């Protein structure tokens, strides 16, 4: 492994940690209707668990209601069951044609609880980024021994590793602050 490939690999891993954080944030409820909350919902469709969003059209109505219109009206009951089983904290309402999920306004206690979840996801991401930094530092030590790198080169690359780490930790902090602001906005 070269220094360049080590940095490229480290950057890719840190980028994946950030994208995983974004994915987890997308499924955190904020009081507004968000179709991404349905990404983990699977519906039994002819015996095969199928993602709900592949079987229906999902639209946001008035900011607090998700309207789910299955393409195949015969699976409406299955969609309701899957939504109830998904434990979204919202009971589905059906009128025989579409299913509605009405998002109740969040209480201040619930908002604080959600902010704690956001902080936990952020902290987990930072731990992952720091672990990647440690792996990069270990790889640098191996390269130092195998390629007899000078102390100056090693020191410069340690600084470079720290700068990359700081950059991704700042990104995760910024994303968490943005999500907390979104959660706390009434």
Image: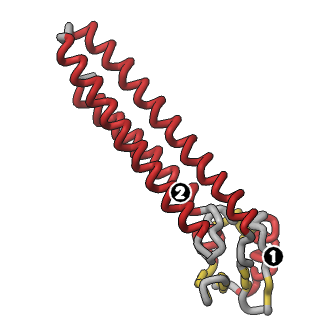
Q: Which residue lies most toward the front here?
A: 108
Q: Which mark is residue 174?
A: none
Residue at position x 18%, y 18% from top? 153
User: Where does the image place residue 165, in percent across and percent down from the top left?
Assistant: 37, 36
The crowding category of the residue bearing disc 2, from other C-alpha atoms within 10 Å (few below 14, some 14 to 19, many at least 20), is: few
Q: Nearer the viewer, residue 83 or 176?
A: 176
Is 101 on the left or on the right of 157, as rendered? right
User: Where does the image place residue 136, in percent across and percent down from the top left?
Assistant: 36, 25
Is 159 on the left or on the right of 70, as rendered? left
Residue at position x 61%, y 65% from top? 39
The crowding category of the residue bearing disc 1, from other C-alpha atoms within 10 Å (few below 14, some 14 to 19, many at least 20), is: some
Residue at position x 56%, y 58% from top? 25
Q: Which mark is residue 91?
A: 1
User: Where does the image place residue 18, in percent across and percent down from the top left?
Assistant: 45, 48
Q: Is residue 186 above or below residue 109?
A: below
Q: Earlier in the sequence, mark 2 or mark 1?
A: 2
Residue 137 occupies quadrant: top left
Q: Nearer the viewer, residue 33 or 86?
A: 33
User: Where does the image place residue 73, in percent across and percent down from the top left?
Assistant: 72, 87
Q: Which mark is residue 23?
A: 2
Q: Is residue 121 above or below residue 112?
A: above
Q: CA distance from mark 2 to mark 1?
A: 24 Å
Element marked by disc 1: loop
Q: Which quadrant of the rendered structure holds the N terminus?
A: top left
Q: Which quadrant of the rendered structure holds the C terminus?
A: bottom right
């Amino acid at each position: 492994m070269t220094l360049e490939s080590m940095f490229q690999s480290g950057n890719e891993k840190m980028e994946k940690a950030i994208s995983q954080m974004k994915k987890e944030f997308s499924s955190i409820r904020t009081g507004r209707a968000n179709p991404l909350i349905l990404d983990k919902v699977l519906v039994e469709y002819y015996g095969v668990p199928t993602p709900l969003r592949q079987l229906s059209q999902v639209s946001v109505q008035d900011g607090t209601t998700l309207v789910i219109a299955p393409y195949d009206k015969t699976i409406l009951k299955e969609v309701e069951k899957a939504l109830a089983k998904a434990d979204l904290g919202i009971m589905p309402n059906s009128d025989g044609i579409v299913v509605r999920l009405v998002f109740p306004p969040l209480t201040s206690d619930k908002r604080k609880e959600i902010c704690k979840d956001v902080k936990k996801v952020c902290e987990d991401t930072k731990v992952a980024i720091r672990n990647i930094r440690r792996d990069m530092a270990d790889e640098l030590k191996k390269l130092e021994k195998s390629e007899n790198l000078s102390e100056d080169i090693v020191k410069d690359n340690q600084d470079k590793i720290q700068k990359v780490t700081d950059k991704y930790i700042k990104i995760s902090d910024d994303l968490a602050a943005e999500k907390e602001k979104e959660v706390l906005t009434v």
